[in-house]
Image (cartoon, rainbow, N blue to C red):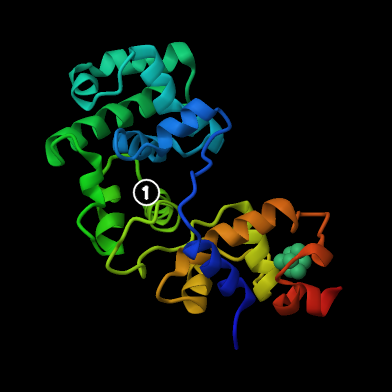
Amino acid sequence: MKSILLNIAKEEFNNNLNKVHFVDDKYANNFLNNLDKYPHAFVLACLMDKRIKAERAWMIPYKVYKELGSFDIDYLYKKPLSRYKRLFNVGNYHIHNNEAAKYFYKAIHLIKEKYDGDASKIWKDNPSSATVVYRFLEFEGIGIKIATMAANILARQFKIPMSDYCSIDVSPDVHVRRVMKRLYNLPDNATTEQIIYKAREINPTFPGLIDYTCWKIGREICHPKKIECDKCPLSKECYYYINKK
Ligand code: SF4
């Protein structure tokens, strides 16, 4: 049976490259989209994206850039950890400023020492998706959720060529969870692993492909209380809509 969800996700994947919307601030957004000049900004932003709102996390590299007046990797590399700790604490960038500053500093050192200062070497050589995820996991402070999210953004939105996509899982947040539970009649207390394996079952060659479509529908249509099934493109295959309306 053809899946409407998969069709929508594939269409989005095949669309031409658009600028990725990370943050509302257009200068910061352009900065994060500039993978040619500042590939390390993308990596550092991914690293910051935990325990705080995504918008706040993704602004951090740009704030550092504005404070220091440069985002050149050699310049960043020369700054001591104490400088980053001061920046993070004075600007209150994160809820865990000292820890986030330490991860930020260590990531700069890994990029400089392992990738000659060029973070795009993490994804440049047509690697397998497992290699990309693994390379992100080598950064202190990055777990599997962020590593797969980073690989997914690179593949799906920046259209970075990879030899396969099978190791890119969904990174289930509240929206993805809610939509997948209703769509596939998963239990209310479905674990992260259940969500991930359901996505693998649906599209084993690229499980994370459906992540963005589910997230968007969850954010815009499939709300916790106000469930606007009449507007939803997935209604014809949605368990909740078919059985509980
Ligand atoms: S049909 Fe309704 S319940 Fe199903 S995903 Fe769409 S909005 Fe959610």
Image side of residue 194 versus residue 189, left or right: left
Count neighbours of disc 1 (C-alpha within 10 A) and say few if under 14, some if 14 to 19, many if 20 or more.
some
Q: Amino acid at mark 1?
A: Gly
Q: Is residue 51 above or below residue 132?
A: above
Which residue sits furthest bottom? Answer: 1
Q: Nearer the viewer, residue 97 or 71?
A: 71
Relative image position of residue 104 (x, y in whole percent): 32, 29
Q: Is residue 225 above or below residue 23?
A: below
Relative image position of residue 127 (x, y in whole percent): 23, 61
Q: Nearer the viewer, residue 87 or 230?
A: 230
Which residue sits furthest right? Answer: 245
Residue at horizontal 34 percent and vertical 55 percent from the top? 160
Question: Can residue 187 be seen from the camera position used here?
Answer: yes
Residue at horizontal 67 percent and vertical 60 percent from the top? 178
Relative image position of residue 185 (x, y in whole percent): 68, 74
Numbered disc 1: secondary structure: loop
Which residue sits furthest front? Answer: 16
Residue 99: which quarter of the image? top left
Image side of residue 119 versus residue 65, left or right: left
Relative image position of residue 98 (x, y in whole percent): 37, 22
Quarter, ligand 1: bottom right
Question: Can residue 86 be seen from the camera position used here?
Answer: no
Residue holding disc 1: 143
Residue at horizontal 60 percent and vertical 66 percent from the top? 190
Residue 175: which quarter of the image? bottom right
Image side of residue 119 versus residue 66, left or right: left
